[in-house]
Amino acid sequence: MRVEIEKVLEAMREDYKRWSMASRTVHQNVDDFNRSVTNREEMTETFCNGFEVKEGIRYWKIISTNGSGTQRSVAGFIAKAGDKKFREGDMLKAAGWATPARNFARGNVMDGSGIADVRWTGIG
């Protein structure tokens, strides 16, 4: 399961890198440009290294940090074992810090469905 969860984290990292490059701005001089590139690279590194996966009784919780490393949020949950509604590996959007949204699965890490739809902002 850890290997499959790492695929979700990698999809989030790659999406953040794409978003970061697309959001760059045009600068008037070389110093502003170099400072902007350095800040963007630092924020990307902080975000990409800031993931934490916590094992709970029923779910794996994916926690991410923002680019500056000052705030943490739940990016989503992954079901550990099947229950009446979900299969093992189902990806669930976060409803709050401690609870997933149990309306429907956003994909499954075991069969790879939905991983391409994961964004840096989380599962959902």
Image (spheres, helix red, strand yellow):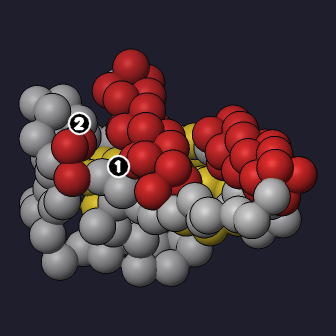
Q: Is residue 53 left or right of residue 84?
A: right
29 lies above or below 101: above
Percent from the top left, x then y, of residue 93? 33, 68
Percent from the top left, x then y, of residue 94? 41, 71
Q: Amino acid at mark 1?
A: Ile
* Earlier sequence position, callout 1 versus callout 2: 1
Quarter holding the N terminus is: top left
- Residue at left 11%, top 41%? 113
The single residue placed furthest to the top in the displayed view is 3
Percent from the top left, x then y, of residue 22? 45, 57
Number of residues whose C-alpha sits closer than 10 Å to that of mark 1, classed few (under 14), some (14–19) or many (20 or more): many
Q: Amino acid at mark 2?
A: Val
Disc 1 + disc 2, Cβ < 8 Å: yes
27 lies above or below 99: above
- Residue at left 70%, top 63%? 27
For the residue pair 97 and 82, the one nearer the viewer reads as 97
For the residue pair 62 and 47, the one nearer the viewer reads as 47
17 lies above or below 76: above
Number of residues whose C-alpha sits closer than 10 Å to that of mark 2, classed few (under 14), some (14–19) or many (20 or more): many
Percent from the top left, x then y, of residue 3? 39, 20
Q: Is residue 98 left or right of residue 123?
A: right
Quadrant for residue 2, please give it. Answer: top left
- Residue at left 51%, top 50%? 21
Q: Quick check: can you spot residue 39? A: no
In the picture, the disc for residue 78 is: 1
Tell me the residue that label 2 is attached to.
109
Give SS at disc 2: loop
Quadrant for residue 108, please give it. Answer: top left
Give SS at disc 1: strand
